[in-house]
Amino acid sequence: MRKSILVFSLLSLPLISCSTAFEYLPYVYKVDVNQGNMIDQAMIDQLRPTMTKRQVLYIMGSPMLVDYFHQNRWDYIYSSKKSGENYEQKAISIFFESDQIKSIQGDFKPSSTPVAKPNTDKMVDVPKRDLDKTLTEKFSDLF
């Protein structure tokens, strides 16, 4: 019996040590894991006390958690684990009263001044193409 336990422990030792050995190997790709709603300070700065649920949905996206028993509370949670870095989690709860924002709690603090989202759309002028004949006109000319 003792012999079998000794053999088992000697055989399992390399398997146990592999998990720690792979953590420090160079050139090993580790996948970045992001879960939840992406939350940043620019999104929180756009929220105002008189906003409706629909406006919050437009700015923040759909909430991660909507409690069935507390319909007036929306929870947004974001967690990130990047290779070589610590686990990071950010959360924010938005409370509504009569379909308008009542309060905000969480890891972010809204700004006191109104902030407009900067427009990142780019306009491109496309020059007009000079087409002598369309494709069907060219085919009709052949016949």
Image (tube, rainbow, N blue to C red):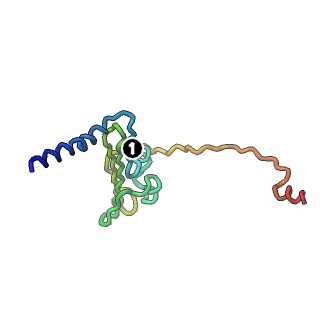
Number of numbered markers: 1
Q: Residue at x 66, y 43 (%)?
A: 124
Which one is nearer the viewer's eye here, 119 or 124?
124
> Label 1 amino acid?
Asp
Task: In this rendered view, identify the residue nearer to me: 54 or 99.
Answer: 54
Tell me the crowding category of disc 1: few under 14, some 14 to 19, or many 20 or more residues within 10 angstroms, Cα based.
Answer: few
Give the residue at x 42% y 50%.
Answer: 47
In the displayed image of the protein, which residue is found farthest to the bottom? 69
| Residue that appears at 40% across and 40% down | 29
Quarter assignment of residue 61? bottom left
Instruction: Give whichever of 1, 93 is nearer the camera.
Output: 1
Relative horizontal placement of residue 51, taking residue 86 as reference (left or right): right
Looking at the picture, how far across and down is residue 113, in whole percent?
43, 43
SS under mark 1: loop
Relative placement, left or right, of 100 versus 134 is left
- Residue found at the far left of this picture: 2
Give the residue at x 40% y 51%: 37
Q: Position of residue 41 (x, y in %)?
A: 40, 43
Outermost residue toward the top in this view: 26
Q: Residue 17 falls in which quadrant of the image?
A: top left
Task: Give the labeled residue for mark 1.
Answer: 32
Quadrant location, the C terminus: bottom right
Residue 26 x %, y %: 36, 33
Q: Nearer the viewer, residue 123 or 17?
A: 17
Residue 97 at x, y percent in the picture: 35, 61
